[in-house]
């Protein structure tokens, strides 16, 4: 979804660090235009009446659901 300069979108995310394995969770996706793989941290839009910390936790859970 594209936004104009007059619109504001709030998002929340997190950097998830596993100190037992010295690893950081990143999500790998494919860019639609270039076809290149991109690494990013889990994040997304804050739902109406949702606290930013709750949104960040939800986004990590949703986007990392298939990580094993």
Image: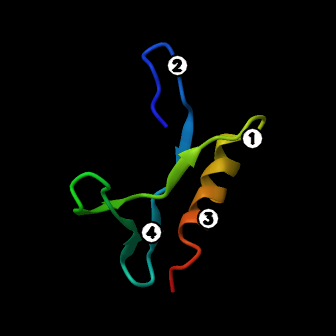
Location of mark 1 (residue): 50
Residue 62, image x, y percentages: 61, 64
Where residue 39 sits, quadrant-wise, is bottom left
Q: Are marks 4 and 1 in contact (CB under 8 Å)?
A: no
Between circles 3 and 1, the one closer to the viewer is: 3
CA gap, disc 2 and disc 4: 32 Å
CA gap, disc 1 and disc 2: 19 Å
Location of mark 2 (residue): 7
Q: Earlier in the sequence, mark 2 or mark 4?
A: 2
Helix, strand or loop under label 3: helix
Helix, strand or loop under label 1: loop
Q: Are marks 3 and 1 in contact (CB under 8 Å)?
A: no
Mark 1 Cα within 10 Å, few/some/many (few <14, many 20+)?
few
Q: Who is closer to the viewer here, 17 or 45?
A: 45
Between circles 1 and 2, the one closer to the viewer is: 2
Between circles 4 and 3, the one closer to the viewer is: 3
Q: Are marks 2 and 4 in contact (CB under 8 Å)?
A: no
CA gap, disc 3 and disc 1: 15 Å
Between circles 4 and 1, the one closer to the viewer is: 1
CA gap, disc 4 and disc 3: 17 Å
Q: Earlier in the sequence, mark 4 or mark 1?
A: 4
Residue at the spot 56% in from the left edge and 33% down from the top edge: 10
Mark 2 Cα within 10 Å, few/some/many (few <14, many 20+)?
few
Location of mark 3 (residue): 62
Residue at the spot 60% in from the left edge and 52% down from the top edge: 56
Q: Who is closer to the viewer here, 60 or 36?
A: 36
Q: Are marks 1 and 2 in contact (CB under 8 Å)?
A: no
**6 over 64 or under it: above or below:** above
Location of mark 4 (residue): 17
């Amino acid at each position: 979804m594209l936004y104009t300069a007059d619109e504001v979108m709030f998002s929340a995310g997190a950097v998830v660090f596993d100190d037992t394995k010295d690893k950081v969770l990143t999500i790998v996706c494919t860019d639609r235009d270039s076809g290149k793989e991109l690494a990013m941290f889990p994040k997304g839009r804050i739902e109406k009446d949702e606290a930013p910390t709750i949104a960040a936790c939800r986004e990590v859970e949703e986007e990392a659901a298939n990580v094993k």
